[in-house]
Image: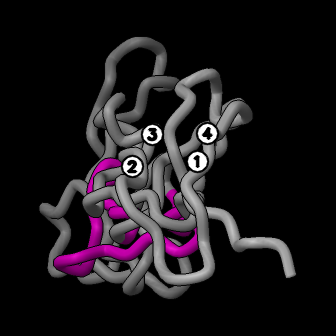
Amino acid sequence: AENQYLTLDDDNGGSNQNYCEACPAGSTSSDGSSTTCTCGGTQYFEDNECKDCPSTSTCPSPPCSALTECTCPANHYVEKDGSSWSCTACKTGQTKDASNVGTDQAATTCNAATSCAENQYLTLDDDNGGSNQNYCEACPA
């Protein structure tokens, strides 16, 4: 039926029968043969619930069907702390293309700054996970 999805009953004495389950509040499905629910704009469906994409990330072609479709914006890198993902801004002058959460190891660092704006100077980032990328810092007053 509408707003239900087809799931597998792994707790059914080992017989693994499919059954219909209601979609979580705020989500929908097109019919009873759907295997996932459609969540709102910056959410994805996992473990029978709608979960938010990490902060500042977006769902480029909503709805997202998995965490890996959430995308950190340009000039942000993907960071994981335990099981929690986030999009963290690069330091001033560093750059990074938009990248998907949870899939690309290269998404965890920003590119070094090669030039800075007026009244800034290029310095070495010794606190960036040991990657030592250049970034821009404001000149002292």
How far apart, in angstroms, are the residues tagged by discs 1 and 3?
14 Å
How far apart, in angstroms, are the residues tagged by discs 4 and 1?
26 Å
Relative image position of residue 137 (x, y in whole percent): 67, 64
Residue 22 appears in the picture as rendered: no
Q: Quadrant of the N terminus?
A: bottom left
Q: Mark 4 = which residue?
A: 124
Left or right of residue 24, residue 69 in this image: left
* The magenta segment: 49-73
Q: From this view, report whether residue 22 is shown above or below residue 97.
A: below
How far apart, in angstroms, are the residues tagged by discs 2 and 4?
27 Å
Q: Secondary structure at mark 4?
A: strand
For the residues carrying marks 4 and 3, which lies nearer the camera in this image?
4
Q: Residues within 10 Å of mark 3 (few under 14, many from 20)?
A: many
Q: Check if mark 3's residue and mark 2's residue have beta carbons within 8 Å.
A: no
How far apart, in angstroms, are the residues tagged by discs 3 and 2?
13 Å
Q: Check if mark 1's residue and mark 2's residue have beta carbons within 8 Å.
A: yes
What amino acid is at disc 3?
Thr
For the residues carrying marks 1 and 3, which lies nearer the camera in this image?
3
Q: Mark 1 = which residue?
A: 85
Q: Residues within 10 Å of mark 4 (few under 14, many from 20)?
A: some
Residue drawn at 25 percent across, 82 percent down: 2
Q: Nearer the viewer, residue 53 or 12?
A: 53
- Name which of mark 2 and mark 4 comes first in the sequence: 2
Q: Secondary structure at mark 2?
A: loop
